[in-house]
Image (cartoon, helix red, strand yellow):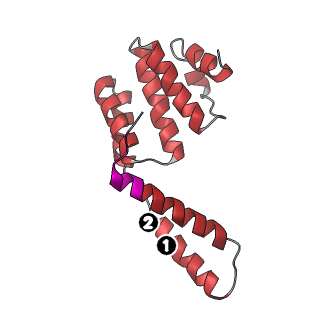
Amino acid sequence: MYRRSRAASNRIRQWTTLCAAALLLAGCQSGPWRDMKESFKEVFAGFKPKGEPALAVGIRQYEDGKYPEASESLHSALYQGLSSADRVKAHKTLAFINCVSSRPAACREEFRRALAIDPALELVAAEAGHPTWGPVFRAVKTGR
């Protein structure tokens, strides 16, 4: 499992608090609540998880066949913080890397992590038909 630094835990706590406040204010259309709602929109518009650049580098390295470097970048991105959708993308890419690197147990574990975040995850047709990771994904998805 990944360890979070105290700073990362504080950012997550702040983000959660902001999300809860935004949800509470989402239905408010008048008075001071409307102004607060607009302030939250500005705050959220500027929020970008710190791990996004490392994720982009990791995916590019994966596409270039630089699997050890890609794995390192993707793990770094996960450690730095990513949105749920990006965490799924990172774990899925790590699963692909592990599968083609003949590490089936690690491949399964990364698919499990991705599915824990998004149980509805499906591979696109080209990915699902891949002879190495397609069967592994299907087996993890069905619980075999």
Task: Answer whether labels 1 and 2 touch (C-beta < 8 Å).
Answer: yes
For residue 117, which quarter of the picture? Answer: top right
Mark 1: give few (<14), some (14-19) or many (20+) Cα within 10 Å: few
Residue 48 in view (yes/no): no
Q: Position of residue 76 (x, y in %)?
A: 33, 39
**Other residues around mark 2 within 10 Å, as few (<14) / some (14–19) / many (≥20):** few
Q: Amino acid at mark 1?
A: Glu
Query: Which residue, given by chain and number where applicable, does mark 1 sit on?
Result: 42
Query: Foreground residue, 17 or 50?
Result: 17
Looking at the image, residue 30 sits to the left or right of residue 90; the answer is: right
Give the labeled residue for mark 2: 46
Residue depicted at 42% across the width and 19% down the height:
98
The amino acid type, in three-letter code, at marker 2 is Gly
Q: Secondary structure at mark 2?
A: loop
Per the rendered image, the range of residues in magenta is 3-10
Find out whether residue 17 is within the magenta segment: no
Q: Describe residue 42's horizontal placement relative to residue 34 as left or right.
A: left
* Residue sitting at x 47%, y 15%: 105
Q: Quadrant of the C terminus?
A: top right
